[in-house]
Image (tube, rainbow, N blue to C red):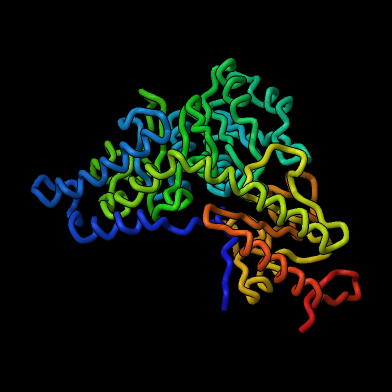
Amino acid sequence: MKRVYLDWNATAPPATSVIDAMVVAARENWGNPSSVHHFGRAARACVEGAREAVARLALCDPRDVVLTSGGTEANNLAIRSAFAREPGVLVTSRLEHPSVTRVAEALEREGRARVRWVNVRSDGTIALDDFDRAISSSDVRLVAMQAINSETGVVQPVHDVIARSRRAGVPVHVDAVQAFGRVDDSIPGADTRSLAGHKLRGPKSIGALVTRPGLTLVPLLLGGTQERGLRPGTVDPVAAAGLAEAARRAEDAPARWLCIAPLRDELEARLVGLVGGARVNGSGAPRVPHVASVVFPGWAGSELVAALDLEGVAVSSGSACSAGTNEPSSALMAMGDPAAAVSSVRFSLGEDTTYEDIEFALAATARVLARARIAPDGAHGLAR
């Protein structure tokens, strides 16, 4: 059965060169990077190679790169560090990834932070006038803002956020997981930035937190002295070798991702023509060129995802980290469209997506929608 993968925002298939680098490391550099003998030094070289490659991608010094298990740990480390010694206000929005919103909620329950949720515009960007109000008091400890929304592909005004926060004397953490290696902007003005290897066509289980020089972090875990004590535990040199190669090839990747725009536009235009009232989430805002989040009115997005999988098309109905829940998308709810929050399907393309893949996905979607039945309450469902 032919299968087409259109869920690149959830994870990107590892590049061949990444797999090759990891195979070599698994055979030759499998030692403990903390050991001082030959095998440890060889493994350590893989770890430091990853740090240096991430630093080049992020336009920073390697000393300001902390290797983590991925974007979630990086977000947790950045946000919790800001409130480890003194409580205050955290400014963020409901557009954020769960590794930001749930940490914000936890800090509030723990009495470590008061959260100011910035209003969201209907186009999927934060309201900058409300943001200005949110950072106006002297007790704001941190702003946590994403660069690109993983569900809609909407690009946030992160440089405006950084500039306004600088004037207010407030540090900024940017969740740049969906940005590194996909857009030509490493957002160097942020105090901290998160990165995930598997979004760069690298391995899972490894990522990084990039910090400004001299920033003090507080570890989430206690243990050894790895990563300067900020992330104790043995670093996997095999994953590090994969991250190093992924970061190197990501330096010129944005140009390749930009070429995807015509395919995304074709897919989007034809999808909205399949069902009356279908629309694109975030269509009025700047978006990355590979994401199409489409509302199919009256449908359950999760049901369409399952039906398309049976047809050989892999898509999603929201953030992969929220998959398996019955809750509507918090990002789409924040945009003021409850119907979209339960009726959207995200098609995210990648470097390897072809026109034939798009045609296959469109034909499959048309077949699924043609099997529809109308329930007594007017909602759509699939004929059994």
Horizontal and vertical percent position of residue 133: 70, 23
Residue name at image x 63 percent, y 42 percent: 288
Taking the view exactly as shown, the residue that stands out farthest to the bottom is 384
Residue name at image x 54 percent, y 17 percent: 169
- Vertical arrangement, residue 66 with respect to residue 246, above or below: above
- Vertical arrangement, residue 171 with respect to residue 315, above or below: above
Taking the view exactly as shown, the residue that stands out farthest to the left is 37
Horizontal and vertical percent position of residue 53: 34, 39
Q: Nearer the viewer, residue 139 or 338?
A: 338
Q: Quadrant of the C terminus?
A: bottom right
- Vertical arrangement, residue 75 with respect to residue 307, above or below: above
Taking the view exactly as shown, the residue that stands out farthest to the front is 355
Q: Is residue 75 visible?
A: no
Residue name at image x 55 percent, y 45 percent: 257
Residue name at image x 59 percent, y 59 percent: 354
Q: Quadrant of the N terminus?
A: bottom right
Count of number-bearing discs: 0
Q: Nearer the viewer, residue 136 or 195?
A: 195
Q: Nearer the viewer, residue 178 or 258?
A: 258
Horizontal and vertical percent position of residue 13: 47, 59
- Vertical arrangement, residue 183 with respect to residue 346, above or below: above
Horizontal and vertical percent position of residue 304: 71, 68
Q: Is residue 84 visible?
A: yes
